[in-house]
Image (cartoon, helix red, strand yellow):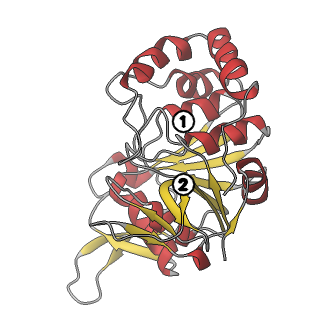
Amino acid sequence: MAEIMGLAEAAAAVVRDGDVVAMEGFTHLIPHAAGHELIRQGRRDLTLVRLTPDVLADQLIGAGAVRRLVFGWGGNPGVGSLHRFRDAFERGWPAPLELDEHTHAGLVNRYVAGASGLPFAVMRGYAGTDLAGRAAHYRPVTCPFTGESLAAVAAINPDSAVVHAQRADREGNVQLWGIVGVQKEAVLAASRSLVTVEEIVERLDPVPGAVVLPTWALTAVAVAPGGAHPSYTAGYSERDNDFYVAWDAISRDREAFREWIDTHVIGVGHAETTP
């Protein structure tokens, strides 16, 4: 059952040094507030699993929190490269970064298998790509019914999962809607989970296409209004496009990056409300 608590307390309870931690949100509902709290708490040696690592991943990597990245695509969307990601991988600053690259379909299927309690998922893919020769969690298999060659991808079961959502009720049931990715699968596959939300409400009113994460599947819920910024939360905030453009210059320079982290992350706490 989910416990509703403050962000700092929730992050400390859910994400530990050395964790395999999934932080999901697809263009939308990206859990920046929770990621910043992990930086403030000095998390280290994380294996970050993220379908599309972008600015949040860049910040965590540049802060020295991430040792290994499991991903499908990486970049500053609509702008260009992730310069802290590149600096860590190419030059080992602030620490060496290991990469485990997948296709989007491959990583999604790994989440689905983990959420389903299965050891692997079967899909069409990888054959004919250079990933087939170097993806540690892929094996070719033969269909016992048709003889077709298929791809088996190992389940991923993170130690912890972190996502952002629109709202939760007082029992810790969470509701999210809009463009969603693999938040549900990441939470169900993980041993522990943290969901930050815009608000706590008395009742979760129906929303077309909404996903409900039941309280029994969650560890902690924390109120963090604006917790997806600079990405957005449908119905609550808009995407801060100017930030993504500005991040390109900030992240290119180590000292500019350190100054930004010290000023906007280390030196402040996310505005929290008491549920």
Q: On residue 56, which mark appears? A: 1
Q: Secondary structure at mark 2?
A: strand
Please tell me which residue lies in front, 24 or 120. 24
Residue at 52%, 21% (x, y): give it.
Answer: 83
Q: CA distance from mark 1 to mark 2?
A: 22 Å
Q: Within the image, what quadrant is residue 151 found in?
A: bottom left
Q: On residue 138, which mark appears? A: none
- Residue 140 percent coordinates (x, y): 37, 69
Q: From the viewer's perspective, tell me whether residue 28 is left or right of residue 173.
A: left
Disc 2 marks a residue whose amino acid type is Glu
Disc 1 marks a residue whose amino acid type is Leu
Residue at 50%, 41% (x, y): give it.
Answer: 228
Discs 1/2, front: 2
> Would you name the residue on which mark 2 appears?
199
Q: Please tell me whether residue 184 is drawn above or below residue 1 in the rendered image.
A: above
Which residue, as the protein is rendered here, is positioned at the far bottom? 145
Residue 138 visible in image: no
Q: Please tell me whether residue 56 is drawn above or below residue 144 in the rendered image.
A: above
Labels 1 and 2 touching (C-beta < 8 A): no
Please tell me which residue lies in front, 174 or 184. 174
Give the mark nearest the N terminus, 1 or 2. 1
